[in-house]
Amino acid sequence: MAPVALARLTALLPPERVDRVETYAAAARRLLAGRTVWNISSTARGGGVAEMLAALVAYAAGTGVDIRWLVIGGSPDFFALTKRIHNRLHGVPGDDGALDAAARATYDATLAGHVGELVDLVRPGDLVLLHDPQTAGLAGALRERGAHVVWRCHVGVDESNRWTQEAWGFLQDLVAPAHACVFSREQFAPAWVDRRWLRIIPPSLDPFSAKNVELTPREDKSLVRRLGLVVEGPAVPLADPFVLQVSRWDRLKDMSGVLDAFAGHLAELPPDVHLVLAGPADGVADDPEAGEVLAECRDRWRSLAPAARRRAHLLAIPMDDPVANARTVNALQRRATVVVQKSLAEGFGLTVTEPMWKARPVVASAVGGIRDQIEDGVSGILLEDPRDGAALAAALAGLLGDAKWRRELGRNAHDRVHEHYLADRHLIQYVDLFAQLLG
Ligand code: UDP
């Protein structure tokens, strides 16, 4: 990961924020001298964790901290299991598999395969950030090695149920050796996490990444040619307004639900408005369900009436070129009239923050971290019941008919991201945690 000077980011910040982050960067250099900060996750691209790590690691390296990012692999069985855990942490079963002794054996065997290499790399006194359930089981070995271990969980739901309890039952003794835990929201942390070592650190967005950087008209045009990536529906007529949801093909993102709400309430929406649902063309490394969910969504599209099929477009964007992928999403988000995120559960939605940064009006489910991201009616619209397609359609109809309101929500959305969700706040929170761990 090439280092990026913090100055790139601070150019956007008011002087008091520049001073604060520079003071922290200097403190981090002193505190972390002679140590390495390791990030360990299970996918290098696709999904919010990879998106965020790429930016944070680059900025941290730019401040002179020795920081690295390792990605662990695993068998399809391992990723099927960790996806099951992921789903259950969101309160849904995912599949009918168990989290039993056999599952634990699969999990342990995969991580045992990585431990040898990791304990060679990580030195006593280093800091290790383990991301999500896929890596939780490394905490014990790395603590034994003498590292300071933080487990960061990027997912969660506000209210626990039998599925979350089952997943936490699986994870509890794996996470226990970690010195500290980080969650995006207080409500996501199970009761057994030691509150003295629990930190709430929401994600952040990088305005200069390929996903978020401003595009020249030429770049925008060339990218839009990639909209030939339609897998269902006619080519997107870019002169017309469109509603967009960008997500991995994951049932919790409810792409099919967006399609149903749009098609079922077509008559209430302006006649020239289209719907674009965009997701990765090929699987994200640690997400084995993607192919199935895309197929379900395509089936749903095929079952729509012709009038809806003419105006709904499913796009599958290749992931092989991460920069082209990111720029395509960027262009789509910038051009969208309204952006939707109809998630049924969401730890924190970068797909909400990204269009907010681009001053787009966002309509999103009032679930998990999205409740913090959007102030309802001010910097976007929250839908109390994520399954209520009629409410989504009504919110869309209201916004699509009112350009002034769209502009106002978009402006406030941008300001909210600027104030709360940029990397300076995020890096500062990490430095505070490291200082406490090493203090
Ligand atoms: N994303 C992408 N291409 C796609 C679909 C999603 O680059 O086809 C990105 C999206 O822009 C965002 C991330 O993947 O940066 C998704 O992060 P989010 O926090 O919204 O959800 P997650 O996938 O982590 O559950």
Image: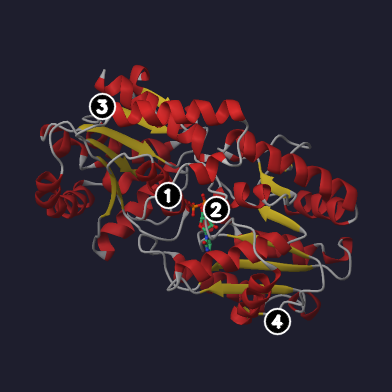
Closer-to-camera residue (354/138): 354
Number of marks present in the image shown: 4
If you read the primary sequence from the N terminus, does the residue marked by circle 1 or circle 2 appear first?
Answer: 1
Residue 434: name its quadrant. top left
Identified at 81% across, 74% down, the residue is 239
Mark nearer the viewer, 1 or 2 = 1
Say if 265 sits above or below 151 in the image: below
**Residue identified by numbered label 4:** 235
For label 4, the SS is loop
The answer to whether residue 384 is visible is no
User: Where's residue 222, x and y in %?
Assistant: 63, 77
Identified at 42% across, 44% down, the residue is 59
Distance between mark 2 and mark 3 Cα atoms? 33 Å
For label 3, the SS is loop
Report crowding for label 1: few under 14, some 14 to 19, many 20 or more residues within 10 A (C-alpha): some
Identified at 70% across, 38% down, the residue is 415
Closer-to-camera residue (69/112): 69
User: Mark 4 and 1 residues: CB-CB less than 8 Å, in contact?
Assistant: no
User: Mark 1 and 2 residues: CB-CB less than 8 Å, in contact?
Assistant: yes
